[in-house]
Image: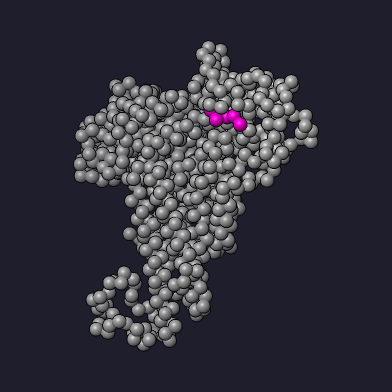
């Protein structure tokens, strides 16, 4: 048994949370059951009865952590940090009978030594061999090594022992400059640094790549055209393909200690229907399922030659036989074809992020066991994709169902992980996943169907320095109405209202009628959310529960609420704006139009543009503090495009209002007063409808005459029957199909 002792003062655990001369002892104890951890204290109270009413504690107080795996030792430390944030109680009436140092400066709060020791005591064990997470580093955002290290520290304190970095082409492949070209891929040295750091925390880092589909980033370049089946899928049975794959697998696995490797192979839509069909299909047609399995066998053989244990996403083993590439093909297809011969040493990873019923997951675990003769790895989803902030309540519901099915003794599941995807630009704050990571880990150490929520809140505060409640409240960016989703086996999703409303074309606003038809007041919703988050960002803000201890007011990581606060502010001005502009214009309410779009800084459009500039600036700063610079250009173009559209529509409205003030009419000729006000009449801007202003643009401002606004006059229709939509940037940024 190995022992290590640290003073709590060295770990930053002294002060009001406990005695400065307390000791924290770590003991590696192989006599414990596998995956177990025990936390105990040397006495039932760290203040002996004989202690004086003031002065130092008489004897050392020892907190002992016994563990088998290093990851459990760090989880125990996370538990202790949580207790330090949950040990103050309202002061008892007999203050003179207790140690003076146990009270805060106000005398209203009291640290109970007995209660603290009771909360410190803990015995638990991990329900799975692997408690892991996968982070997308391929959709624009490639986390810096320092960001990964920060995340690893938090994951270790939560109790994780596995990390996968999803890298389609974001790792450097020697002598292949167009592999991950201008994408900020990781070098071998960077990946070794990550692996070394993770190993010190008891975390296994598993390379996670792609070896068939999701390779459009490399297949766009002429260098790889010969290996392309479709725009996203490699050409199977092409020898050059397998030369590349061996190099990819060898390179991706080399920096890591583990012998495991995730080979991807999900969503290979169109497999064998592109160039493959042109080259091979004419002579020996094969079902795509057969092409997939034969390719899997060849890739597995490469991995085995390199001494690696492969795993793949399982969806195409269901979708291809069902001839259905949709989620229904994966989740609702009949039992798998038992004739499919999967290599016995390949592990399947079942991913589902859309279901709230544990029975659904139980059924799919069973279908995987029929297919592979063993239970799958289980992958849940932290809903970060296509949004700016994680959809936390929906994530909790789906993860709870997933893990409760996996925890059942008959499931046979030994490995679980929570995935963090960045589809549609990786716009989200990566730290918005922290509450979901914590909740997921708590379930992995909890036999019951739900975790101890008060303890979870305290641990989150102690580990991260943020309020769990506040981070969840920020998810109201997309939770804009009552949750009407039922608990059943159907596919559900988390709407991304804040995303589509942000990027929706501001002058045309063609998605918003669905919200207006629902009766929701998004303007009021986002104004209230912005006000709440502003309050929670204030230094020394009171805790949501006013009876809570004053320690909960020290929340430095609440600073990350700035992104949702700025976004909510923008949306409070943008929600319903097009409807207001349309109504004022068609009703001829020019005063209202002035209030909405006048040049004054107090007009609604002026406030929107100022708030949007703030959001753009902050998001850029946060991005570059978290990710490599590659990929931000995608979001810069989105912000730039939106700001340009707001500038243009604002300029047109200002010119139109000036036309009316000068005595013009809607659709009439430009007012004479405006024409007379020009510095030069050498050339008219318009002659017979043709723009002929050679000096146009010199001022840097929009200077065409505006006598009417047909874009605001156009009536809108309800496009979507429900306001609960999951829409991408390209769908909402313009009505034009291109």
Q: Please identify the residue farthest to the front as the structure is shown.
A: 55
- Residue 296, by quadrant, is top left
Q: How is the image coloured?
A: one colour
**In this picture, residue 219 sits left or right of residue 560:** left
Q: Give the residue at x 72% y 24%.
A: 52
Is 77 in front, or is 550?
Answer: 550
Answer above or below: position of 627 versus 647: above
- Residue 134, by quadrant, is top left
Residue 14 belongs to magenta span:
yes
Q: Which residues are magenta?
A: 11-15
The reply to whether residue 413 is visible in this rendering is no
Q: Tell me the quarter of the image containing the C terminus.
A: bottom left
The overriding secondary structure of the stretch rendered in magenta is loop
Position of residue 138 measured from the top left corner of the image (x, y, whole percent): 36, 41
Is 93 in front, or is 621?
Answer: 93
Q: Give the residue at x 63% y 26%.
A: 19
Residue 137 belongs to magenta span:
no
Position of residue 396 measured from the top left corner of the image (x, y, whole percent): 56, 40
Answer above or below: position of 222 versus 659: above
Position of residue 543 measured from the top left corner of the image (x, y, whole percent): 63, 45
The reply to whether residue 11 is visible in this rendering is yes
């Amino acid at each position: 048994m190995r022992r290590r002792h640290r003073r709590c003062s060295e770990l930053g655990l002294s002060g009001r949370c406990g005695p400065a001369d307390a000791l924290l002892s770590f003991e590696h104890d192989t006599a414990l059951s596998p995956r177990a951890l025990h936390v105990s204290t040397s006495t039932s109270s760290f203040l002996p009865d004989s202690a004086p009413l003031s002065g130092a504690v008489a004897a050392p107080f020892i907190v002992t952590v016994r563990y088998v795996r290093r990851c459990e030792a760090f989880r125990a430390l996370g538990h202790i940090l949580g207790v330090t944030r949950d040990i103050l109680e309202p002061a008892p009436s007999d203050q003179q009978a207790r140690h003076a140092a146990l009270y805060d400066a106000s005398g209203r709060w009291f640290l109970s030594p007995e209660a603290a020791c009771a909360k410190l005591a803990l015995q638990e064990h991990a329900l799975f061999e692997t408690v892991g997470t996968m982070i997308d580093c391929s959709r624009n955002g490639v986390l810096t090594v320092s960001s990964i290290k920060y995340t690893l520290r938090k994951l270790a304190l939560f109790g994780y022992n596995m990390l996968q970095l999803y890298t389609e082409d974001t790792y450097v492949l020697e002598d292949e400059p167009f592999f991950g070209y201008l994408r900020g891929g990781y070098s071998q040295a960077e990946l070794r640094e990550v692996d070394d750091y993770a190993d010190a925390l008891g975390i296994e880092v598993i390379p996670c790549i792609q070896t068939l589909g999701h390779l459009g980033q490399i297949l766009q370049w002429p260098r790889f055209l010969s290996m392309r089946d479709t725009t996203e899928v490699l050409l199977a049975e092409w020898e050059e393909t397998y030369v590349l794959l061996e190099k990819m697998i060898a390179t991706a696995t080399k920096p890591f200690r583990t012998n495991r490797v995730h080979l991807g192979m999900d969503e290979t839509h169109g497999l064998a229907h592109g160039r493959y069909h042109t080259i091979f299909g004419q002579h020996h047609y094969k079902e795509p399922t057969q092409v997939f399995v034969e390719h899997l066998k060849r890739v597995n053989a490469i991995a085995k030659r390199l001494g690696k244990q492969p795993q793949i996403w399982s969806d195409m083993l269901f979708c291809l036989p069902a001839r259905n590439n949709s989620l229904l093909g994966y989740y609702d297809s009949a039992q798998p074809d038992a004739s499919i011969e999967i290599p016995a040493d390949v592990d399947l990873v079942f991913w589902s992020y859309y279901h709230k019923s544990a029975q659904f997951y139980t059924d799919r675990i069973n279908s995987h066991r029929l297919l592979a003769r063993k239970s799958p790895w289980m992958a849940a989803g932290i809903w970060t994709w296509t949004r700016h902030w994680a959809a936390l309540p929906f994530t909790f519901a789906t993860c709870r169902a997933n893990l409760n099915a996996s925890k059942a003794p008959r499931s046979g599941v030994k490995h679980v992980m929570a995935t963090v995807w960045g589809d549609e630009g990786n716009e989200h704050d990566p730290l918005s996943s922290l509450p979901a990571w914590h909740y997921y880990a708590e379930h992995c150490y909890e036999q019951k169907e739900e975790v101890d929520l008060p303890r979870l809140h305290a641990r989150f505060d102690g580990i991260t320095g943020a309020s769990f409640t506040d981070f969840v409240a920020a998810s109201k960016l997309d939770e804009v109405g009552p949750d009407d989703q039922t608990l059943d086996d159907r596919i559900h999703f988390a709407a991304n209202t804040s995303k589509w409303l942000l990027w929706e074309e501001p002058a045309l606003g063609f998605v918003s009628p669905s919200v207006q038809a629902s009766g929701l007041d998004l303007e009021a919703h986002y104004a209230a959310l912005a006000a709440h988050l502003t309050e929670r960002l204030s230094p020394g803000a009171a805790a949501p529960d006013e009876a809570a201890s004053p320690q909960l007011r020290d929340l430095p990581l609440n600073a990350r609420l700035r992104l949702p606060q700025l976004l909510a502010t923008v949306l409070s001005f943008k929600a319903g704006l097009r409807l207001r502009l349309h109504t004022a214009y068609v009703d001829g309410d020019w005063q209202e139009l002035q209030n909405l779009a006048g040049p004054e800084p107090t007009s609604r459009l002026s406030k929107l543009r100022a708030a949007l500039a703030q959001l753009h600036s902050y998001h850029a700063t946060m991005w570059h503090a978290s990710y490599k610079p590659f990929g931000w250009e995608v979001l810069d173009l989105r912000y730039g495009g939106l700001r340009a559209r707001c500038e243009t529509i604002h300029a047109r409205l200002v010119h139109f209002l000036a036309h009316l003030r000068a005595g013009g009419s809607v659709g009439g000729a430009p007012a004479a007063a405006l024409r007379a006000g020009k510095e030069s009449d050498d050339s008219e801007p318009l002659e017979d409808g043709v723009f002929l202003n050679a000096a146009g643009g010199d001022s840097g401002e929009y200077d065409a005459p505006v006598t009417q606004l047909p874009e605001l006059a156009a009536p809108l229709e309800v496009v979507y029957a429900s306001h609960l939509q999951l829409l991408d940037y390209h769908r909402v940024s313009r009505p034009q199909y291109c």
